[in-house]
Amino acid sequence: MNADFITPLDAFTIIDLILMLMLLIVGLAIVRLNDIFAIVMLAGVYSLVSALWFVSLDAVDVAFTEAAVGAGISTVLMLGAMLLSSRTALPAKPVRKWASFFIVLATGAALMYAVTDMPSFGDPLSAPNAYVGLEYLKRSLPDTEIPNVVSSVLASYRGYDTLGETSVILTAGLGVMLILGMGGKINGQLKKKAIDYDNADAQAHHTVLRVVSKMMIPLIVLYGFYVQFHGDFGPGGGFQAGVIIASAVILYALIFGVDAAKAAVPPLVVRIGAALGVLIYGGTGIAGLILGSNYLDYNVLDPHSAPHGQELGIMSIEIGVLITVCSVMLVIFYGFTSRQPDITDKDW
Amino acid sequence: MSTVLEILHIARFGLAGVFLLGGGFFVLAGAIGVLRLPDFYTRLHAAGVTDTMGSTLILLGLMLIAGFTLLSVKLALVGLFLFLTSPTATHAVANAAHKAKLKPLLGTYRQTRKGDNEGGSQ
Amino acid sequence: MIFATTLMLMGAMTLMLARLLRGPELYDRVLAVNSFGTKTVLFLCVFSFLIGRPDGVDIALLYALMNFIGTIAILKFFRYRALDVALSRMPSRNTRKKAGAKS
Amino acid sequence: MTMAMALGMIMPILTWAGTHAPPLVVVTPLLAGPIAVFLHKGRLAWAWALAISILTFVFVLLLMPQVIQNGHIAYYMGTWVPPLGIEYRIDSLNLLILLLVSAMGVLSLVFGLPLVENEIEESKRGQFFAAFLLCLAGLLGVTITGDAFNVFVFLEISSIATYVLVSMGAERDRRAYVAAFNYLVMGTIGATFFVIGVGLLYMASGTLNMADIAMHIHGHSDNRVVRAAFAFIVIGLGLKMAMFPLHTWLPSAYARAPSMVGVFLASTATKVAFYAMVRFIFSVFTPGSPFEGAVFDLVLAPMAVAAMIICSVQALYQINIRRLLAYSSIAQLGYMLLGLSMGSIAGVAAGLLHLFNHALMKGALFMGVGKASLRQGVTNVQDLRGLGKTMPLTAASFTVAGLSLIGVPLTAGFVSKYYLVVAALERGWWWAVAALIVSSVLAIFYIGKMLETMYLHEPPKITKSKKTAPQAPAKTSLLALGPLMLMAAANIYFFFDASLPKGLADAAAKALLGGGAS
Amino acid sequence: MSWTPQIGLILLLAIPLMGSIGVLSFSRWPNVREAATLLAGLALVANVTALVLNVHAGGRPMLELAQIAGGLSLTLTLEPLGALFAGLASTLWLINSFYAIGYMRGNHAGHQTRFYLSFTIAIAAAMGVAASGNMLTLFVFYEILTLSTYPLVTHNGDAAARRGGRIYLTILMSTSIGLFLPAVIATQVLAGSTNFTDGGLLAGVITPGIASVLLVLYAFGISKAALMPVHNWLPNAMVAPTPVSAFLHAVAVVKAGVFTMLKTSVYIFGLDFMQTIPAAHWLAGVAAVSIVLASLIAMTKDNLKARLAYSTISQLSYITLGAMIATPLATLGAAVHILTHAFGKITLFMCAGAIYTARHVTTVSGLKGMGKAMPFVFGAFFVGSLSIIGLPPFAGAWSKLLLMMGSTSPTNRIFIAALVISSLLNVLYLVPIPLKGFFGVPPKGDDKKPTAPRLTVIPPVLTAAITLILFFSIGPILDFLRPVFEYGGG
Amino acid sequence: MGAAKIAIAVSLLITMGVLWLALSGHFHDPLLLGFGLFSAAFCVFLAWRLHILDAETSPYHHIISLLVYLPWLMGEIIKTNIIVVRTVLSPDMILTPRLVRVKHLPRTDLARTIFANSITLTPGTVSIDMDADEIIVHALLKEMVNPADFANMAARSARAAGENPITTDEGKAS
Amino acid sequence: MNGMQFLAGHFNYIVVIILMMTGLYIVISTGNMVKKLTGLGVFQTSVFQLYITMGKVTGGRPPIVAHAPEGAEHAAANGGEHGASTADTAVRMVHDMADVPVNGVIYSNPIPHVLILTGIVVGVATLAVGLALIVRIRETYDSIEEEDVEEAEYKARKAANA
């Protein structure tokens, strides 16, 4: 541990301090508030501020993902599954409060105990920063010709992790499909409409919303593709693009109703997409196997120039990830909105 | 010739600085407005201030600094998106509040320094 | 002076947080979250200039979209207690001709 | 001539499969999962899942000669040298677990068909088997990988698949959702603790490859970050494997899950988490250092003993038969933990041997209950009445497995309990021997209770007139009987010839303790 | 393929199992099934006698059944003690089979196939215990004996049988797994193996302190020897039909217990080492107390079978007492007592069974004047009880005499008192039964009532006669057993 | 009707292509340009699939009239901004909030949206609800509520959305 | 290293630990299932913050290695040489300050970012499955509070036994 390394006090540390302060405020607010609605929004703010902090810590890719997922999709998922049987949560019982406080204190003490030996913040010669991390920085460009080292490590060096990650998303999608079904028949009869909206006041009241959204949707989809294909040069990649494109369709569903969205992007296509993505990813790996080298080795994909092979391999698995993530996000959204809980007025 | 470029250069940064600080000022004003104003609908206006003046000034300032590169195009895009989404969002919020029968505070409303505010008449 | 602007923006963000926590009505909270989002977008742009890396703007662009979608989802849920309701009459296939004529 | 030609053709494929067996073991079920989602027609999904699990078992068998021949295999993903890329490292320790998990996968699938058809509705069957395959892939992935973070990723795949599978039991018992939810929350907290542990390890060593980490932190085991990492990994994996104080989620999860899932989980899920803990404690950290030694004696051993006694007592008072078996699983896990916490080669070997035998016993017991529930709809211990007369073969296998659980001679349970006591005596832990005895005696009571209801009580009258559970077609019940009888026979066989599991367990223990980080 | 001792050992186990297969296959034709059992019994007796002769000639046949990984093995061997117990068990099994056929037919009992089947497995286990080469093999067959006798005990299948069975199984299993198994494993760890070695496996290997702990584990672990605190299963096992209690609880099960106790003290600890172990003396005291106490309880029992059960408990403690005193003469006496008590007690049980078959009378008070109707049964009962009391013309006398001669050292003198007192008590609770039978006033029309079937009368008379013959032919038996104790005593 | 739709599709495709180039910055890398084309085409396909392929989705053919309208709107925004900021920041703040119904909206949806958004964009006023014939507007101060401004804005936003001028005069008349 | 230096150097970690403990507290203390999942999200996000603070190098830039023209050959040479050296299993342990900049520019450590991308995905997956379960729990028990669920179960069990 490099003893004489001192973290300089400059503009960035001040910004970090303020961001940390905000995080603490939001964290404490979530602890104390019991209005579920506020909690959901605070959770969104929490992940947004942590995305900002990630940006100031040079973790641009992670900030991108955290903003897309933490602030965006999680809030929509929470609302989609929104089960406000009652707007406020019951306050925790005192005995449970003290017990959990004690457990938390113990774990916190264990971590604090470890802090003393941790390398100081930002020290370039600390164990993690000076060893394999540096090795990746040096070898990524010559090996894969991809400037964004995070994308190259994610897709090629530790490509197997990302295969695991894509399978995790698929499992989650599968889980939601199994638990909630995708809004077809609920044990036999077609889902009855809780409130008959067709003739209700949903006439052309929201022209503003409709027109702006119609204008926004192509832009969002294009931006999604930009993020997908520029994953090599800047933050972005299969996962973030998948989320963006899925959120475009979700916006459409919000405005024009889930049934319209299901007509346009049918559940069957989405289910196939979820499986297809993982198969593409796994298939690229097996292609490496068939061409005689180890699993997930892209060098052999292009016989005459290894780095180009790497680029090809990375591009194909990014597409795989895009398809899976986009489809699974839609599967989850369809799943949640298909089992709309008919919240009666009394508990609203 | 080079001096003209230099002057232009300095002017550019100077102007950008002015824009940035102005934008910052408007954003702060909007934030203070959101806190001070008594009722939901009035706060909408204060929020509007930041979205419009604040963002345009800051983004223009940044574009000046970025000069004539792709970055400023991207900044313009951010501006465009903000211009599209924020009024719609404010409209949507107002619409939802209106539908939920949230009564706006009408009539005159005075709030003096001492912070004692007489409620507006209906 | 970029740093000064960042500080001002962060100040505004903290004020928004205050409104979010104190907001008596739900709609004040929604408003606070929405404007907090816009301010973060601006902060991201300015901050990416402070660092000197152009990637922050991408994130700003992304969050501008996400913020919009999030706010619409919150409002729509709260108004209709359900996300799957059609907000406006979708120009379905058979009525497209009518809608086409109207616009 | 055709034989030679065929052989000529097969040999290269075999060698190819041999060299690339490590990734194929995990990838085949992983990629077969998504495909299974589309197979709705009747038994197609089941047949597909069975074929894939058999193929996986074959790949594991292909691994066996290589591991036994040269100690351990290292396979570099994407031909990147270890600290850069992810490396699959297989030695006799995880070979034992791989064998167990893949074998149990095949057996529970063969056994599970009538149960699945009975409990899962037609439309969801394809997705059910997809989730099952993904869970199998996750468990195999955790066992086989040599990279710390990769363990977390595959642990999550198997856990999420398990939460979903457990919640599938809701058609039978609506509390399955609540059980799955608690399991999810506790499991995720465990996984997050594990991630904190891996993060601290990364902070201390700079790499994620287990062998590399061990090399880097070999010297400074007094470093506080390493100690905190050790603590967090132990707690995280403890939660995942239902170590004593952190086990509250397991009984209701196993009791509410569909019976086929119960069979598979009972014999594999907690064991893989136990393997991960053994791997981290012995291969990554240095077991000799004072801190680890203290944790062994002050934390792991008491927890093991507490699990053995308290969970056996709780098992006594259970009415629901699956909860009873779940509590006894936690107690048996206490045995393995006791073996581990002794820190000696004999202790660890005994623990691993018990892990192998317990999988056989508990698998057979859950199968027995599953098969009985097909005929009589068994949920409580009372429903086993008269099983001795109505289903003699199932009752016989159930009895053999029960006796093996108690540790009666002529059954595998006796052998592993024997070696545990020997190891405890060598270590001089008298109180551990006492705990082992008390827990075995308690086992006599709760197994005895079940055996008595089975043999001596009259079968409930209703079985004669109308079947409570729809009578499974005779053919498949035969299919279900096969694995059950096989497991019971295995319980007896491994009493006489315990060389296979014992050999692997000893080799593993020597590799872990003798070789240490090498 | 000529008969060699090794094959003999295998046959020890194989014959009863073949018998069981025979019983199973012919279950639909009772006569053929009974014939199969008897045939197996005959073959077993023949095989055992051949083996006994071989052992007497000094042969020690050895056979390894199975090799569990890592130095553990199931081996069979035969030495004089084992041969004695095997011979005893096989002959009595033959006799008891005749008796059982009569009894079961007489009482029209159900599930006879299961009855005979478990019988054959039990006898196979008993043979295994007799011929086991090391303590681990002995433990394995010991457990199988418990499990195989469980269906016999719960034969009637009613609530009482179930309750009795549950107590039977729980006590036997928990003590065996709880105490006996750790003792076996400890021996394995301490001595490297559990083989029965002449002069004691652990002699000199461990300190007397540890040895006493181990001895206590063994003493209370082998609950089949019915030492006082762990004896409760035996009275509860009386719910079983009489041939079961006659054979098992007079011969196979309890005798296996005390046989193991004897083997432990002779072969595991060795007689000289036993002297130095403090716990041995203390356990001898416990044995003495259980002798006296069991006899007192027996007196209070009105139910005939309960009285016999408690008398068995006290007689068993004789043997345990001999094993614990561990002088050559005392252990020799203990071994002989196994033999004599077996024949004596089986006679009493058979008589009780016969009475029950004839008159369905189970209480002692109900026997008034029955002797006139069934002179042979009560005669045999009288002879049996005399042998148990230990009066000279009957074999029982020798074993008690040897036991008393063995405990002449100052510290053991107290035990002689215990032996004498218990003999007196035997007289008090056994002799009144035949007296009441012969001289009591029979209720009116007692002679018209049915007498016991012939098959249930002949076996007890036969065994009573054997106790008489044994008294005179004790010499060869003593020479047969002497090398065990001489070598040990040496 | 088919021809109009194809025209819109083409205009959307072009706009997407321009936007892609603006975003990506890699002009001469064939692979990326290929991807750009593919993604633009996919956007159009998705728009068609979602039945939102109409004038409102890609109003880009009115781009000129929109650009003309923008500076005027900026001017308006700056003016009202200064007023609102002055009222908000002044120590003794006097507010006269009003709720007003504005009639005579432009005909097409696009024009109406531009009109409503412009009202919201000018900070003093917020458009709360819009149905067939009127918009409910909430104003911060009573000075901002005179109908003339609204009518002028309505006319300009109608022209921005490319409507023929005849309709504007009857808007001014009421 | 005196107290102040230590505090400055480790302040980030301390704040992250406090956030982690807040998240954990929310999960354990609340009975409401939705708040529990939110707490879980906060807990996981703060663990990711721990990883990222670990990887930050002062003065470093996001790990996007520009095609520095003059640095290219140097990097290639360096890379090539490195390639050779890594042929053997152990990677050379880098220790001196000179080695920190790559192509003349200091970058932050990319590994934590890769791990956290996977972590966030896992977080979302668990959140989605958790919410799906809550939807079904709410349908069966009409409440998402653990006390109400237990109560309902208790009544059901009593009714069953009665």
Image (cartoon, coloured by chain):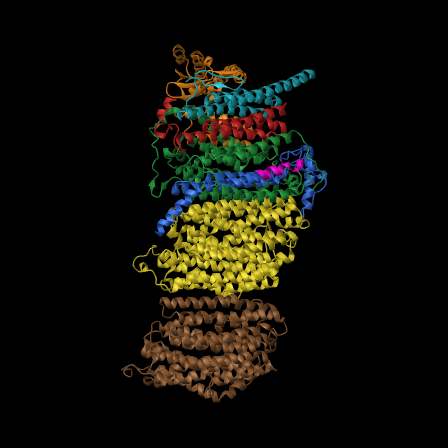
Chain colours: A green, B cyan, C red, D yellow, E brown, F orange, G blue
Quadrant housing residue E22? bottom left
Answer with left or right where residue E263 lies relative to residue G58: left
The residue at 37%/59% (across/down) is: D475
The residue at 48%/79% (across/down) is: E422
- Picture coordinates of residue A42, whole percent (x, y): 51, 33
In-front residue for pair G110/A215:
G110
Q: Which residues are magenta?
A: G7-18
Q: Does the magenta segment cover residue E330?
A: no
In-front residue for pair E139/E51:
E139
- Picture coordinates of residue A217, whole percent (x, y): 46, 29
Answer with left or right where residue D200 lies relative to residue A191: right
D65 up-or-down from E472: above or below: above
| Numbered circles on residues, count | 0
- Picture coordinates of residue E89, whole percent (x, y): 46, 79
> Does residue F94 show up?
yes
Judged by its main secondary structure, the magenta piece is helix
Answer with left or right where residue D224 lies relative to residue D493: right
Q: Quadrant of the C terminus of chain E?
A: bottom right
> Does residue E123 show up?
no
D300 up-or-down from G48: above or below: below
- The residue sitting at the bottom extreme is E472
- Picture coordinates of residue E209, whole percent (x, y): 61, 69
- The residue sitting at the top extreme is F173
Q: Does the magenta segment cover residue G15?
A: yes
The residue at 62%/24% (across/down) is: C4
In-front residue for pair B48/E431:
E431
